[in-house]
Image (spheres, grey):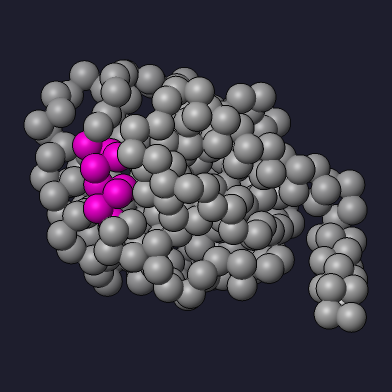
Amino acid sequence: MREQVYTDPRPKEHFDRFHERARTREPDYAYEFTRLITSIYAYTLLRTRAISPENVPGSGPVILAPNHFSFMDHFLSGCYLRRKIRFMAKSQLFKPPMQFVYTHGGVFPVRRGGKDEETFITAKALLDRGSAVLMYPEGGRSRTGAIAERARRGIGRLALETGVPVVPIAVFGSARVRNWKRLQFPSVTVQYGEPIRWERVDKPTADQQEAVAEAVLDTVKAMYERLGQEGRKGVRRQINSSRRTSRR
């Protein structure tokens, strides 16, 4: 596994054009083509199945908050959703030739090594337009095989400053996606939790941001652990049973 690079030496101005495009233009054919290829891979070799995708609103602004083990998590989170997702991605990925795919696919950069206000400006602009924005509560990819102990405050800030719902997502099995090199393909389950919403706060404190971020990550962890204990079928049975009980 490649060593993580946490600082991008390129100046902020280098990424302004990517943010401008993300704020003003919708994803084009590059999104649809990438979605087709990655979805076929997810449906077949990874046997990806979804639980409760209806928890994601079909329209309107929403923040999607999955755990993060693999580069495939972006695509796994979206392959069962009809609406297009706008992804945040580390700025190091924005290099030729792949930056063409990212920019035309609606991806926008997060510049590492400093506080990146442009990322939040872009994310809020997209949410104002009714988009679905994916942001990882862990801040980056876990390389330990376990969900991070602590959340990063960014998702708490975005949720509070916009007041839009957050849908926690547990992606179970993606930690073993890299096993394809040994011709081993895991079975992946993507569970979408109930939307959570907080009252809008114009200037949330660091403590407020952290509290919301931890609440989101705790929900993701609980869903993930339940999938590990009960399995896909067990979780589905429990959800269906709860729904039947609530209708009585």
Q: In which quarter of the image is the C terminus?
A: bottom right
Instruction: Say if 26 sits above or below 119 in the image.
Output: below
In the image, residue 108 lies at what x, y percent? 28, 46
Give the camera-side residue of 172 and 154: 154
> Could you tell me what secondary structure mostly forms the magenta stretch?
helix
**Residue at the image position 57 percent from the left and 47 percent from the top:** 66
In the image, residue 52 lies at what x, y percent? 68, 68
Which portion, as a residue range, is magenta? 118-126
In the image, residue 6 lies at what x, y percent? 38, 20
Outermost residue toward the bottom in this view: 248
Give the camera-side residue of 50 and 41: 50
**Residue at the image position 44 percent from the left and 55 percent from the top:** 164
Res 190 visible: no
**Residue at the image position 13 percent from the left and 50 percent from the top:** 20
**Residue at the image position 83 percent from the left and 80 percent from the top:** 247
Q: Does the magenta stretch include residue 124?
A: yes
Give the camera-side residue of 202 and 111: 202
